[in-house]
Image: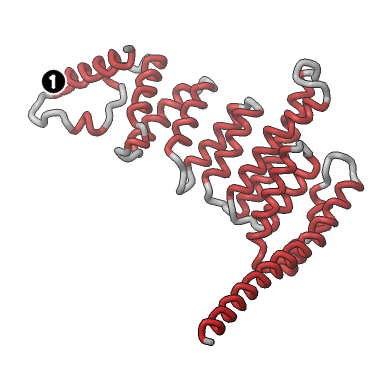
Amino acid sequence: MFASSCLTHFIFLRLRSVCAVLFVLIVLGAATRPIEAPAWQVVKARQPEMNLQAIEGALGQGLIVGVLGGFRAVMADFLWIRTNTIWERRDRVKLDAMVRLVTTLDPRPEFFWINGARMIAYDVPNWRIQEEGGYTDVPESRQQALDREQAEQAFAMLARAREFHPEKAKLYLEVGQIYLNRLKDAPNAAKWFLLASQQSDAPYFAARIYGELLRREGKNAEAYDFLKQLHTDLPDDPYAQKPIIYDRIRELEDELNIPLWQCFQPKAAVETLPVEASLEEKVQMLEKAHRHATTRHAH
């Protein structure tokens, strides 16, 4: 009798759990219909170039919050999986709409913003060039126009992302990388790498790349001053890669013909000089250290 009661109780609990899961799935399935249907109707009614403002108006933030409530994050994850399926099919119209939908549903994950921007800035122009005949047939000017058009869409998306995450270095870096890697625009890329380096969570490489881009633009004197200050400010952390920065400083000193007595010396090197040494002896020690560093760099 007792065993039968326990079994019945166990079965009841399992059935209750299954029913609860089925109910949630039904609710989620029903919730997607009023959200997706208006978006696709707007897309189909317009030209292939999607009108993002119309999509946003058809959806409405208030409608999404009201329909989904606490399920927004779950639904955003589910729709992101569908976004990847659309990406694999190279359906750029639905891709743009779905990325907008996902980031509207849940703007908190940086992953959605960054990867959505990458799809729009890198993949979509490739698809469009292929649709128009491929890289060998499409004129260079047209390719650049498509790159610029898609990059501007990605920039707009990342600008919206910064409204939710104003101090995240990743979002500034992403803009800089699009300028650098897709548009081949080093001057604008440099501005964004500098902005990224100024954020509280900036990786060490952001400032190093900014200094290198200054050199690429021919701004060697500005790069020299920046890298000297950077070397001084960075902690003695292996990830900061201060030896690399020091080598670049030495290269710039050679290119700029900086006199030996004006060459940059790390604070640690100056502090190790004997206190009792004369000024001439200290200069000789620094010259020797500089020659050693130059020889090591040449090898």
Residue at the image point whose x is 71% and y is 70% from the top: 23
User: Label 1 sits on what residue type?
Assistant: Glu
Label count reads: 1
Residue at image position (67%, 56%) is: 76
Q: In this rendering, would 89 be left or right of 202?
A: right
Residue 48 in the image: state x and y as whole percent. 86, 39
Residue 66 horizontal/vertical position (percent): 74, 69
For this orientation, the residue located farthest to the right is 45
Q: Residue furthest front?
A: 1
Quadrant in the picture for the C terminus: top left
Q: Image height check: is 285 above or below 88? A: above
- Identify whether 80 is placed above or below 176: below
- Residue 152 lies in quadrant: top right
Residue at coordinates 56% horizontally, 77% vertically from top-left?
10
Secondary structure of the residue carrying numbered label 1: helix
Q: Which residue is mark 1?
A: 281
Estimate the x, y position of residue 97 in percent, counting from the top left. Answer: 77, 48
Quarter location, residue 64: bottom right
